[in-house]
Image (cartoon, rainbow, N blue to C red):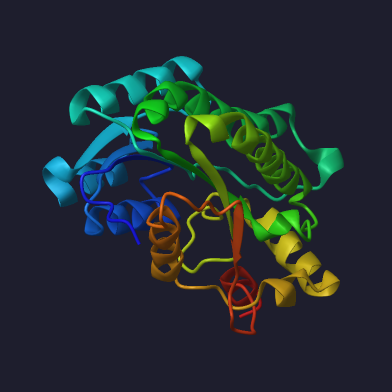
C-alpha cells in the first residue's frame, strides 16, 4: 500500500454525509484536502475542525466557473493536486411524470455536469502528479429504484464517463475509478425530501423489494476506510469499479423510520 502522506485531494459535497467522512479519513491518512460544498455552517465547522489540513471552499459544482476557481485555489494553496473525489450529488424521489423542470435539471447539473466540470479542471494538475479520480456512484445503477430513476440514470452516466476517461487518461498515468456505494447510515440526502414523497417512496420500495436489496445501512466510517484503501493501492494497479454494499440484512433507515 502507498502512503497518502503529502497528497492533496479535492472532495466535493464535503460538508455533509459521506463527504465529511471522506475528508476525515483522508486527513487521518496524511492528506490535505480542498473541501468543496455550498456555503454553510457545516462547511465552516469542517474547516475549523482540521485547521491547515483542510481548505474549505464554498462552491456550487453545477457552475463550471466556480469549479475552475476552486481547483485553482486548492492548487495555489497546497501546491499540487493528487486526488479527486467526486462525491457531491442530489437525489430526490419523485414520480417521473410529476417531476418539475427544476428538479430534473438539478440532477443533471449536479450529478453529471458537476462531475464533468471538476474532472476537466483537474486533469492538467493530475497529469503532473500521476493522480487519481474516484467518482462515487450508487448501487441503484445495478437495480434502479422506483422514484429515483433519474438519480440512477445520472450515476450510470458518470460510470460510463469514467470508463471512457480511464482509457483516455491511461497514457498520462492518471487512474480513474468508481466507488459504487450502497446505503450508508447517517445520510443527509433525504433530509429535504417532502414528507408525502418520502412516505410514498419508502412504501414503494418495500413493495418492490428494493428495500431488502439495499439492506441495513453500512457505517459511513467503513465506506470512508474503503475509499482510502483504494486510493492507497500501488501505482501499477487500478480499481476500475468497486461496489460496496451492506453485508447485513435489514432495511434502510428511512423505511424503519417511516413505518415506526
The residue at the point 40 percent across, 38 percent down is 131
Asked if residue 35 lies left or right of residue 191, the reply is left
The C terminus - image quarter: bottom right
**Res. 83 image quadrant:** top left
Whole-percent x and y of residue 123? 46, 26
The residue at the point 50 percent across, 53 percent down is 237
Frontmost residue, 242 versus 205: 242
- Using the rendered image of the protein, determine whether residue 42 is visible from the camera's viewpoint: yes
**Res. 217 image quadrant:** bottom right
187 w.r.t. 169: above or below: below
The residue at the point 60 percent across, 51 percent down is 240
28 w.r.t. 168: above or below: below
Asked if residue 46 lies left or right of residue 104, the reply is left
Whole-percent x and y of residue 132? 44, 41
Q: Residue furthest left?
A: 51
The residue at the point 45 percent across, 72 percent down is 219
Amino acid at each position: 500500500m502507498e502512503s497518502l502522506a503529502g497528497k492533496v485531494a479535492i472532495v466535493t459535497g464535503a460538508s455533509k454525509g459521506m463527504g465529511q467522512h471522506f475528508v476525515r479519513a483522508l486527513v487521518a491518512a496524511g492528506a490535505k484536502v480542498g473541501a468543496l460544498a455550498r456555503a454553510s455552517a457545516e462547511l465552516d465547522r469542517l474547516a475549523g475542525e482540521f485547521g491547515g489540513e483542510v481548505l474549505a471552499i464554498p462552491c456550487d459544482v453545477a457552475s463550471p466557473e466556480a469549479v475552475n476557481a476552486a481547483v485553482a485555489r486548492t492548487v495555489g494553496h497546497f501546491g499540487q493536486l493528487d486526488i479527486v473525489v467526486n462525491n457531491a450529488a442530489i437525489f430526490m424521489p419523485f414520480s417521473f411524470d410529476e417531476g418539475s423542470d427544476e428538479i430534473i435539471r438539478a440532477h443533471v447539473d449536479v450529478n453529471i455536469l458537476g462531475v464533468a466540470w471538476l474532472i476537466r479542471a483537474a486533469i492538467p494538475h493530475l497529469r503532473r502528479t500521476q493522480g487519481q479520480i474516484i467518482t462515487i456512484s450508487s448501487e441503484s445503477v445495478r437495480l434502479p429504484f422506483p422514484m429515483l430513476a433519474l438519480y440512477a440514470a445520472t450515476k450510470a452516466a458518470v460510470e460510463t464517463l469514467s470508463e471512457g476517461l480511464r482509457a483516455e487518461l491511461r497514457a498520462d498515468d492518471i487512474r480513474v475509478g468508481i466507488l459504487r456505494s450502497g446505503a450508508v447510515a447517517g445520510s443527509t440526502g433525504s433530509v429535504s425530501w417532502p414528507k408525502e414523497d418520502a412516505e410514498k417512496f419508502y412504501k414503494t420500495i418495500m413493495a418492490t423489494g428494493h428495500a431488502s436489496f439495499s439492506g441495513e445501512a453500512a457505517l459511513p466510517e467503513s465506506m470512508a476506510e474503503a475509499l482510502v484503501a483504494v486510493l492507497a493501492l500501488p501505482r501499477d494497479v487500478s480499481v476500475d469499479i468497486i461496489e460496496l454494499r451492506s453485508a447485513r440484512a435489514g432495511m434502510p433507515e428511512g423505511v424503519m423510520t417511516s413505518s415506526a
